[in-house]
Amino acid sequence: MAGISSLSLATVLDGLEPQLSGAQLSLAEDLFGVLAILDANAGLRRALTDPSRSGEDKAALVDQLVAGRVSPEATRLVRSLVMERWAGVRDLGDALEQVAATVVIAVAEQGDGVEGLDRLEDELFSFIQVVETSHALQRALSDSQATDEAKIDLALKLVPQAGPAGSLLITQAVRAPRGLRPSALVERFLDLVAARQQRWIARVSVTRPLLPNQLERLEAGLNALYGRDLKVNVTVDPSLIGGVRVSVGDEMVDSTVVTRLSELRRKLAG
C-alpha cells in the first residue's frame, strides 16, 4: 500500500490511537467480520472506494450494511475508513485488516505493556516456526476441502500457550488468509507487533556520556512525557555538537545545535 492509501490509513490509525487503551477484542472481531463481507462482495468494494462518490454517501452505505450487526464503535471505524481516499479497490480491505489487527495488538499491550507485546510476539513467531518447517501442516492449513473450524482447531493446537489476542490473530489468518499462506499473514501481523514494540523504546543521542543522575532525570522526563515506562537506549554522537535527539517509535524530538543551525539557515535563505 502506497501513496494516498498509506496516508488514508495513517489518518485512521491516528484517530484510533486514543481509543486503544480501552479497546476490547470484540471490536477487532467485529472489524474482521466486516472485512469478510467486503472480501465476499466485489461490487461493494468498488462502491466503497469509488472516488466519484462522496464520503457521506459511502458512510451511509456502511450504515445500511452493518447497522445492528456490529458495535457502534466498529461502525464508526469502518465509516472513517470509507470516507478516506483509496488508490486501489483492495487497499480498503487491507487497511481494515490492519486496523483490526492493531486493535488486537493494543489489547495484548494493555496492562502488561511491552511484556504483553513480547508474549504476543513469541506466540506468533512460534506458530510461524512450526508451520514453516512442515509441508504437511502448510497443506492442511490451506486445504480447501477442510472446514474453517477444523483448520482453526489444528492451528491453535500448534500454539497451546497462545492467549486470547494471539489466538484471534492466528484464527483470522487461517480463516481468511486473503490470498496468502496463513503463516505469511501471521508474519504480517508479527511485523505490526514489532512496530508497536518500538513505541516502548526511546533512542537517545547525546554529545557526551550522561552521568547517572542525568540519565535518571532523562528517563523520568521521557516516561512522564509519553505516559509509559520506556526502555531508554543512549548513544554518544559528538557530531551533534550539542543538545539531545530522542526518537520514540515514529516520533522525533530534536534539540541539537546542528538542527537549530540548519533551521536558522533555512529561515535566512527563505
Image (spheres, helix red, strand yellow):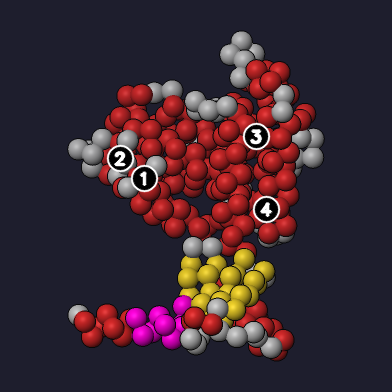
Report the span colored magenta: 254-262
> Residue at image x 43%, y 86%?
257
Residue type of the residue flagged with mark 3? Ile
- Does the CB distance between marks 1 and 2 fall below 8 Å? yes
Alpha-carbon neighbours of circle 2 within 10 Å: few (<14), some, or many (≥20)? some
- Residue 87 tag number: 2
Q: Earlier in the sequence, mark 3 or mark 1?
A: 1
Residue type of the residue flagged with mark 4? Leu
Residue type of the residue flagged with mark 1? Ala
Tell me the CA gap for discs 4 and 3.
15 Å
Residue 248's place in the image compared with 150, above or below, is below
Which residue is disc 3 drawn over?
Answer: 170
Observer-nearest of 184 and 42: 184
> Residue at image x 49%, y 45%?
99
- Residue 258 tag number: none
Q: Quadrant of the N terminus?
A: top left
- Does the CB distance between marks 4 and 1 fall below 8 Å? no
- Residue 2 tag number: 1
- Does the CB distance between marks 2 and 4 fall below 8 Å? no
Q: Earlier in the sequence, mark 2 or mark 3?
A: 2
Residue 143's place in the image compared with 241, above or below, is above
Q: Secondary structure at mark 1?
A: loop
Residue closest to the far top: 145
Dominant secondary structure of the residues highlighted in magenta in the image: helix
